[in-house]
């Protein structure tokens, strides 16, 4: 199986690479359109800032390429947020795969710190990305912006308010948490994705 | 609900784990990658690796170690020790670390906090503070607790936050290695005045100390070393205990 990790100006790409290698997959890290389009699975990771990252993707035509992919695609963290329509982070116009927007967390109480950082539970999990085993299990999050619950939500996490921990539409899947840093639970979710 | 975190800390010298008692008298506590993997299996939520090697050769060894940890361990980890410039941060993040912890270098050059936050995001920047309770004030120290500064814990923590620190890791030199509990009053004051997570460090001797750091000290995470390294407290037992005590932890 050919798995591609899209290379762009974002951090954390190597953590995904390592996680896939632990599962016995040798991914290719590339921004070559041909290699990306011919892959069996595509992973769109990311830690970074929405506007500068979208600018980078557009300059290289990667925005249209990602939108047009037909094989299973998994966006992670910023990758998921960029797959939405619009992000409040830098007022970025994003890829628009998921017709929803990305908002900044507004703390309600002093204890509500932003970024939301650490382990939190996944609830109401559905779609092929999850099995019932992951219900109420913890995954690792680091983010200051969130996707509200919407018709594409396939997992919910509660921090300040319930938000989308994962999304799914057609061949596009995305997680706000980092499966590559979420221990056994994350490995299971990556395995589920690789089986799609 | 966001879980409280348990973080084993591994001090690394020349590729091996060591742990100080009151910052001196090192005892050997094993292979860092194997130990980290074992902690991860037992339910540790994060790991901290501190490079206490001074030499240039030791730095290279540590970077190689960071790569091995990243390749083998599927939970987040922070690295610290000897980070003086942005290029050090870049090197360690590229090797696979999730966060960096800066201590003396932040006190000497507070702009470093801003530079890290701007270039890599606040979430990667942990500011570690070693402080000792002297005449009712928490005085900050440099160089692993060897050199006193003119800064005090609460002011310095606030300044670090405003410069872009993502977390504060507070080690009480007064409590470290003594195993009589964390400085809960100081921790609670930090939690009440800061808007970023606080990691309690220094003083854990029994399971109730962790509970108290979370309930009385309002800490977001608790870090310990020797009680884990020498098997005095098992991480899975600790988390079960905390859960029974009403602390939300990842089981």
Image: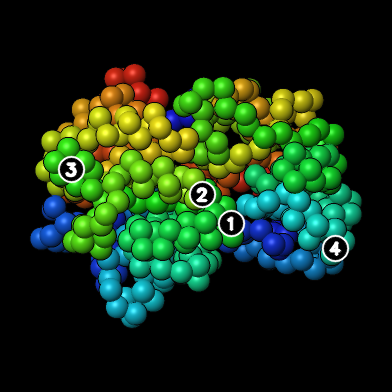
Q: Are marks 1 and 2 on the same chain?
A: yes
Q: Give the mark, 1 or 2, whose residue is nearer the N terminus.
A: 1
* Label 3: chain letter: B
Q: Which mark is residue A59?
A: 4
Q: Position of residue B149 (x, y in %)?
A: 25, 57
- Measure the C-alpha gap from mark 2 to mark 4: 30 Å
Label 1–label 2 contact, CB within 8 A: yes
What's the distance in space between the residues labelled 4 and 1, CA to CA? 23 Å
Quadrant position of the N terminus of chain A in the picture: bottom right
Q: Which mark is residue B164?
A: 2
Q: Which is nearer the N-term, disc 2 or disc 3?
A: 3
Front residue of A130/B175: it is B175
Label 1 CA crowd tier, 10 Å (few <14, some 14–19, many 20+)? few
Are the residues at dot 2 and dot 3 in contact (C-beta closer than 8 Å)?
no
Q: Nearer the viewer, residue B180 or B156?
A: B156
Q: Which mark is nearer the camera, 4 or 3?
A: 3
Which chain does tag 4 point to? A
Residue contact at pointers 2 and 4, CB within 8 angstroms: no
Residue B179 shown left or right of residue B86 in the figure: left
Q: Name the chain letter of the residue that bears numbered label 1.
A: B
Query: For the residues marked 1 and 2, what is the alpha-carbon distance in whole angstroms?
Result: 8 Å
């Amino acid at each position: 199986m050919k798995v591609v990790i899209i290379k762009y100006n974002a951090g954390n790409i190597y953590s995904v690479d390592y996680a896939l290698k632990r599962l016995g997959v040798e991914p290719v890290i590339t921004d070559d359109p041909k290699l990306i389009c011919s892959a069996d699975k595509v992973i769109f990771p990311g830690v970074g800032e929405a506007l500068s990252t979208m600018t980078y993707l557009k300059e290289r035509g990667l925005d249209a390429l990602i939108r047009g992919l037909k094989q299973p695609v998994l966006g992670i963290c910023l990758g998921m947020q960029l797959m939405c329509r619009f992000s409040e982070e830098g007022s970025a116009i994003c890829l628009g795969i998921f017709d929803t927007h990305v908002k900044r967390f507004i703390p309600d109480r002093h204890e509500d710190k932003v970024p939301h950082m650490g382990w939190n539970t996944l609830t109401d999990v559905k779609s092929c990305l999850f099995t019932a085993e992951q219900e109420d299990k913890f995954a690792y999050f680091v983010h200051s912006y969130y996707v509200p619950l919407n018709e594409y939500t396939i997992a919910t996490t509660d921090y300040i308010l319930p938000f989308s921990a994962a999304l799914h539409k057609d061949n596009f899947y995305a997680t706000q948490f980092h499966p590559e840093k979420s221990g056994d639970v994350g490995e299971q979710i990556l395995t589920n994705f690789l089986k799609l | 609900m966001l879980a409280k975190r348990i973080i084993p800390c591994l001090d690394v010298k020349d590729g091996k784990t060591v742990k100080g008692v009151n910052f001196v008298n090192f005892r050997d506590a094993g292979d860092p990658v194997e130990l980290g993997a074992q902690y991860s299996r037992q339910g540790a939520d994060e790991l901290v690796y501190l490079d206490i090697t001074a030499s240039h050769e030791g730095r290279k060894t540590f970077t190689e170690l960071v790569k091995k940890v990243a390749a083998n361990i599927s939970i987040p980890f922070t690295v610290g020790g000897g980070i003086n410039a942005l290029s050090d941060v870049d090197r360690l993040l590229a090797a696979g670390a999730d966060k960096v912890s800066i201590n003396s270098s932040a006190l000497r050059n507070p702009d470093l906090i801003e530079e890290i936050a701007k270039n890599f995001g606040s979430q990667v920047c942990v500011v570690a503070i070693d402080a000792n309770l002297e005449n009712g004030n928490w005085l900050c120290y440099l160089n692993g607790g060897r050199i006193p500064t003119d800064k005090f814990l609460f002011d310095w923590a606030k300044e670090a936050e405003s410069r872009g620190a993502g977390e504060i890791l507070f080690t009480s030199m007064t409590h470290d290695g003594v195993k009589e509990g964390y400085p809960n009053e100081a921790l609670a004051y930090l939690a009440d005045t800061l808007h970023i997570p606080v990691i309690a460090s220094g003083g854990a001797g029994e399971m109730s100390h962790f509970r108290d750091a979370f309930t009385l000290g309002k800490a977001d995470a608790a870090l310990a070393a020797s009680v884990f390294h020498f098997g005095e407290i098992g991480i899975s037992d600790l988390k079960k205990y905390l859960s029974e005590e009403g602390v939300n932890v990842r089981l």
